[in-house]
C-alpha cells in the first residue's frame, strides 16, 4: 500500500515536531506500507528546517520519504504564518496531478492542523483514485475562536468553517487524535465515519539520562528538604501555566519547589509572575525529548493543566500526557476535561482547571501521598498507556482505516 501523508508541519526525531506523521510512517513500513510525507520547507515547530530542499524531490528524513512544498519563513502567529498556509495549499494544488502520477497513492491523509489542506488532499486523491482520510488534531475554527478570542464572523474563521465541513463531508473517514469529536461532526449534519486514533508512545524507545546540572539541581532541592514538582512542555496560555505559577505563589511557606522544563511565548511573562509572587519556581529551559523521561522520573509530582473551555469537551490527547504517565510519577491533572487518558486511567490527583486555590490544594495532596499510594498510582498510569496508547497498536488501527 502507498500512502501520501499531507502535513505542512511534519518533522522527525532529528528535525523536531510534529512527530506523529513520521512515527506512523515508521510503523506502517513494518506492516508493509510505504509512506510519503508531503511537508512545507519551513515550520515554526521544527528545530531543523528544509529551506534548501528542492520542491517535489524525494528526501530521506530519518528513514522516511519526504517531499517538500516551498513555504515562506515567518515569526509568531501573524500574517506571515497565514501566507505560509497559502504557499503550502497553493503549491499542493498546482502539484497534485504530477504527485498523483509520481506517488500513485492508495490513500491520502490531510493532517496540517489548519483545515485548508483538504483542498490539496481532495485534488490529489481524486487524481490518484485514492481513498481520502482527514486527520483531526484540533477543531478549527473552534480552537482560535475559543482560545484566541476571534469572532466566528471573521472572514478567516468563516473560511476555516467552510474548509472543515468540506474536509469532513468529502473524506471517506475521519481519524481524530481527540477522543470525543463525533458529537461535533454530527452537529454539522455530517455522517462520515469517525475513528479515534489518539497519540501514542513508543515505550520500547531507549531514554537518555538528564544532564548532570539538572540532576544536581534536583539533588540540591532535596537536600534542602523540598518536594519537587515538574512540568515539561510549552510555556503557552492554553497550558494554563499562569494558573500553576499563581498556585505556587500561595505555597511560598511550604517546602515545595516547581521546576519547569521548556520554553515558549509566555516564558518571560511567567518568570515575571513568579518573581512578583515570590513563588518557588525554577525555569530550567528545554531538554531534548529523549531526556524528558529521566528528568521527570526524578520528581515527586508532575503538573498538567488547561484553561476552561468548551473545546475540552471533545477531549485531549497531548503527547506530554503519555510522557508523564510512563514515568509512574503522580500527576496533578488540572485539565478541564472528562475525556483524557488521565481520567480514563483513574490515576491522578484531580484539580479544577482554572481554579488556582484548587490547584494549590492538589499540589499539597500530591506531595503528601504515601509511598504505597505513589506506587499504586504509577502502576496504573504505566499500565494504561501500554495497553491503550502503544504506538504499534495505534498505527495498525490507523492502517485499517486507510485500507478501508
Image (tube, rainbow, N blue to C red):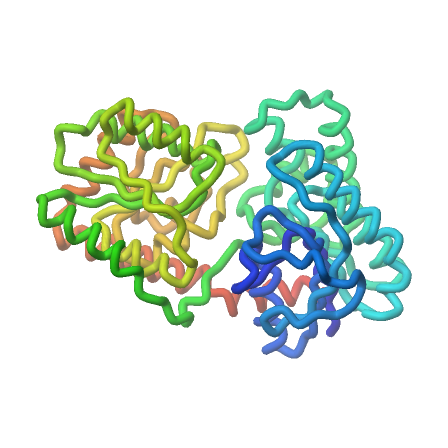
Which residue, as the protein is rendered here, is positioned at the far front?
52
Residue closest to the eye, 282 or 145: 282
Image quarter for residue 259?
top left
Q: Position of residue 156 (x, y in %)?
A: 74, 29
Q: Position of residue 31 (x, y in %)?
A: 61, 77
Left or right: 156 in relation to 272: right
Residue in the image at 23% along x and 36% along y:
363
Left or right: 44 in relation to 199: right
Q: Position of residue 370 (x, y in %)?
A: 12, 49
Q: Is residue 197 visible?
A: no
Against 57, residue 324 (above or below) is above
Image quarter for residue 166?
top right
Residue in the image at 73% along x and 21% along y:
153
Which quadrant: the C terminus? bottom right
Q: Is residue 160 visible?
A: yes
Residue in the image at 21% along x and 50% along y:
217
Which quadrant: the N terminus? bottom right
Image quarter for residue 277?
top left
Q: How many marks?
A: 0
Q: Position of residue 341 (x, y in %)?
A: 42, 49
Residue closest to the eye, 351 or 63: 63
Against 33, residue 128 (above or below) is above
Residue in the image at 37% along x and 41% along y:
304
Residue closest to the eye, 103 or 168: 103
Left or right: 93 in relation to 267: right
Amino acid at each position: 500500500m502507498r500512502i501520501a501523508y499531507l502535513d505542512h508541519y511534519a518533522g522527525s526525531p532529528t528535525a523536531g515536531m510534529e512527530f506523529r506523521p513520521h512515527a506512523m510512517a515508521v510503523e506502517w513500513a513494518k506492516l508493509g506500507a510505504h509512506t510519503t510525507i508531503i511537508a512545507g520547507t519551513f515550520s515554526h515547530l521544527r528545530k531543523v528546517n528544509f529551506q534548501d530542499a528542492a520542491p517535489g524531490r524525494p528526501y530521506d528524513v530519518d528513514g522516511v520519504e519526504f517531499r517538500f512544498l516551498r513555504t515562506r519563513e515567518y515569526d509568531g502567529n501573524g500574517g506571515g504564518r497565514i501566507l505560509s498556509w497559502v504557499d503550502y495549499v497553493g503549491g499542493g494544488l498546482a502539484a497534485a496531478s504530477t504527485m498523483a502520477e509520481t506517488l500513485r497513492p492508495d490513500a491520502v491523509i490531510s493532517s496540517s492542523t489548519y483545515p485548508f489542506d483538504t483542498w490539496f488532499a481532495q485534488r490529489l486523491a481524486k487524481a490518484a483514485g485514492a481513498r481520502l482520510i482527514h486527520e483531526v488534531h484540533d477543531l478549527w475554527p473552534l480552537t482560535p475562536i475559543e482560545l484566541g478570542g476571534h469572532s466566528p464572523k471573521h472572514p478567516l474563521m468563516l473560511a476555516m468553517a467552510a474548509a472543515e465541513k468540506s474536509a469532513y463531508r468529502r473524506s471517506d473517514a475521519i481519524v481524530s487524535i481527540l477522543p470525543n469529536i463525533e458529537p461535533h461532526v454530527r452537529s454539522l449534519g455530517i455522517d462520515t465515519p469517525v475513528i479515534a486514533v489518539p497519540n501514542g508512545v513508543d515505550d520500547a524507545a531507549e531514554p537518555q539520562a538528564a544532564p548532570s546540572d539538572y540532576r544536581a539541581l534536583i539533588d540540591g532541592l532535596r537536600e534542602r528538604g523540598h518536594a519537587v514538582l515538574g512540568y515539561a512542555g510549552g510555556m503557552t496560555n492554553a497550558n494554563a501555566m499562569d494558573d500553576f505559577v499563581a498556585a505556587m505563589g500561595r505555597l511560598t511557606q511550604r517546602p515545595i519547589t516547581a521546576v519547569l522544563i521548556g520554553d515558549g511565548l509566555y516564558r518571560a511573562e511567567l518568570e515575571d509572575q513568579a518573581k512578583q509572587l515570590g513563588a518557588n519556581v525554577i525555569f530550567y529551559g528545554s531538554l531534548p525529548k529523549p531526556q524528558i523521561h529521566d528528568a521527570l522520573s526524578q520528581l515527586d509530582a508532575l503538573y498538567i493543566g488547561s484553561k476552561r473551555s468548551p473545546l475540552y469537551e471533545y477531549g485531549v490527547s497531548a503527547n506530554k500526557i503519555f510522557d508523564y504517565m510512563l514515568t509512574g510519577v503522580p500527576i496533578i491533572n488540572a485539565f478541564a476535561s472528562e475525556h483524557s487518558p488521565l481520567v480514563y486511567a483513574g490515576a491522578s490527583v484531580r484539580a479544577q482547571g482554572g481554579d488556582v486555590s484548587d490547584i494549590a490544594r492538589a499540589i499539597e495532596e500530591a506531595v503528601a501521598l504515601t509511598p504505597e499510594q505513589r506506587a499504586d498510582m504509577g502502576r496504573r498510569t504505566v499500565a494504561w498507556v501500554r495497553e491503550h496508547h502503544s504506538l504499534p497498536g495505534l498505527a495498525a488501527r490507523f492502517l485499517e482505516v486507510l485500507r478501508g
